Amino acid sequence: MADAYVIQVSGRTAGIVARDSRDRSFNFFAATQPFNAMEGRPFADPLAAERAARHLAKHGNLPRRLDQNSLPSASTPINEK
């Protein structure tokens, strides 16, 4: 598995996630201002970060579970492309 991934939403780069070797999570680094709310947040995997970025782009806020400091599950489906 790679150590860093680009996260895109609707054809634009939201940011990157990079593996944190201390706890094996992936930390998000925003590429554009609309995704600054995700800056530095840990995710269980790159798909969880993509899911959160899509939610932020669509709803203007982060998923509630993320705001409660829990990592999104990789089993939650992505509802939009």
Image (cartoon, helix red, strand yellow):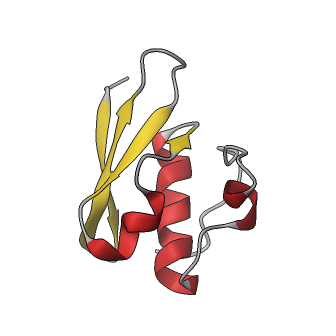
- Residue at 56% from the left image edge and 73% from the top image edge: 55
Q: Residue 75 location, x and y as percent? A: 71, 47
Q: Residue 39 location, x and y as percent? A: 40, 54
Q: Is residue 67 left or right of residue 3?
A: right
Residue 8 figure quarter: bottom left
Q: Is residue 77 left or right of residue 8?
A: right
- Residue at 46% from the left image edge and 74% from the top image edge: 81
Q: Nearer the viewer, residue 56 or 48?
A: 56
Residue 14 figure quarter: bottom left
Image quadrant occupied by the N terminus: top left
- Residue at 46% from the left image edge and 35% from the top image edge: 26
Q: Is residue 46 left or right of residue 61?
A: left
Q: Nearer the viewer, residue 31 or 1?
A: 31
Q: Residue 76 location, x and y as percent? A: 70, 55
Task: Give above or below for 64 relative to 61.
Answer: above
Task: Give above or below for 70 relative to 3.
Answer: below
Q: Residue 6 location, x and y as percent? A: 27, 50
- Residue at 60% from the left image edge and 69% from the top image edge: 62
* Furthest-bottom residue in this view: 59
Q: How many numbered marks appear?
A: 0
Task: Give above or below for 34 relative to 41.
Answer: below
Task: Give above or below for 19 relative to 17.
Answer: above
